[in-house]
């Protein structure tokens, strides 16, 4: 067959060039893989940085929320309760002042003082414990919230006994500070424990947020 016939049968296909070597193919493959790996690495860094930012931001938000909720409960319920009991007097500064305020009012009012507390004030103290128990604090603040709850439990128990004692006083009898001493001391201990636990919780929050 005439060689020219082969060109006509082949439809005028262009002549084949030299095939790429194995080394060229490997270099191309490595270049492609390198670009893909670089892209994946960049994506991981971006996502990782975003996740870290989210986690840190989420932690800060959890501590901020805890502080707002605890301090709001203290203001509205704990401070509100004592403001009601003492009828607007400035906050007492120690156990002795608290006991003196209770004894003074009980001496003047007796059972009427107990009736006033039950009717006007006690609901705030009763609402405080469930408000605190409903919180979901960060793990390292759980014990601080538990200390607040325990202090409220002491306060409630102390007031339950104290009010029952006041209500049992004969109208013709006087309030006996010595007979009420243990009950008043229990109330003062609950007050002190709550103030101490609240201060420690806020110190812990400041360490995380500053």
Image: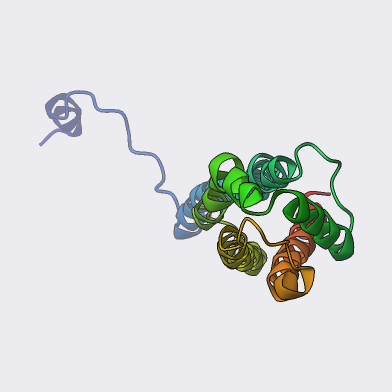
- Number of dots carrying numbers: 0
Of 77 and 53, the residue lying toward us:
77
Of 88 and 18, the residue lying toward us:
88
Of 202 and 106, the residue lying toward us:
106
Residue 41 appears in the rendering: no
Residue 153 location (% of width, % of height): 58, 66
Residue 156 location (% of width, % of height): 58, 62
Residue at image position (83%, 40%) is 89
Of 1 and 203, the residue lying toward us:
203
The answer to whether 10 is drawn above or below residue 86 in the figure is: above
Residue 8 location (% of width, % of height): 15, 24
Residue 60 location (% of width, % of height): 68, 47
The answer to whether 196 is drawn above or below residue 90 in the figure is: below
Of all residues, the one furthest to the front in this rendering is 172
Residue at image position (33%, 38%) is 16
Q: How are the residues colored?
A: rainbow
Residue 101 appears in the rendering: yes
| Left or right, residue 154 beside residue 95 | left
| Left or right, residue 50 beside residue 8 | right
The quadrant in which the N terminus is found is: top left
Dividing the picture into quadrants, the one containing residue 185 is bottom right
Dividing the picture into quadrants, the one containing residue 203 is bottom right
Residue at image position (39%, 39%) is 17
Residue at image position (64%, 63%) is 155
């Amino acid at each position: 067959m005439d060689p020219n016939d082969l060109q006509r049968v082949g439809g005028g296909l262009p002549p084949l060039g030299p095939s790429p070597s194995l080394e060229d193919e490997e270099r191309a493959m490595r270049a492609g893989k390198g670009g893909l790996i670089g892209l994946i690495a960049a994506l991981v860094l971006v996502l990782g940085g975003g996740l870290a930012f989210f986690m840190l931001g989420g932690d800060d938000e959890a501590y901020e929320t805890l502080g707002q909720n605890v301090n709001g409960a203290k203001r509205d319920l704990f401070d509100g309760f004592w403001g009601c009991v003492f009828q607007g007097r400035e906050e007492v500064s120690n156990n002795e002042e608290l006991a003196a305020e209770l004894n003074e009012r009980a001496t003047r009012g007796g059972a009427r003082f107990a009736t006033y507390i039950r009717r006007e004030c006690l609901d705030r103290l009763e609402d405080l414990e469930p408000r605190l128990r409903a919180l979901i604090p960060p793990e390292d603040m759980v014990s601080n919230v538990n200390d607040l709850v325990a202090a409220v439990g002491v306060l409630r128990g102390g007031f339950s006994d104290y009010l029952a004692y006041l209500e049992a006083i004969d109208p013709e009898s006087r309030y006996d500070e010595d007979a009420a001493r243990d009950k008043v001391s229990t109330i003062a201990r609950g007050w002190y424990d709550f103030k101490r636990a609240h201060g420690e919780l806020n110190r812990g929050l400041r360490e995380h947020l500053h």
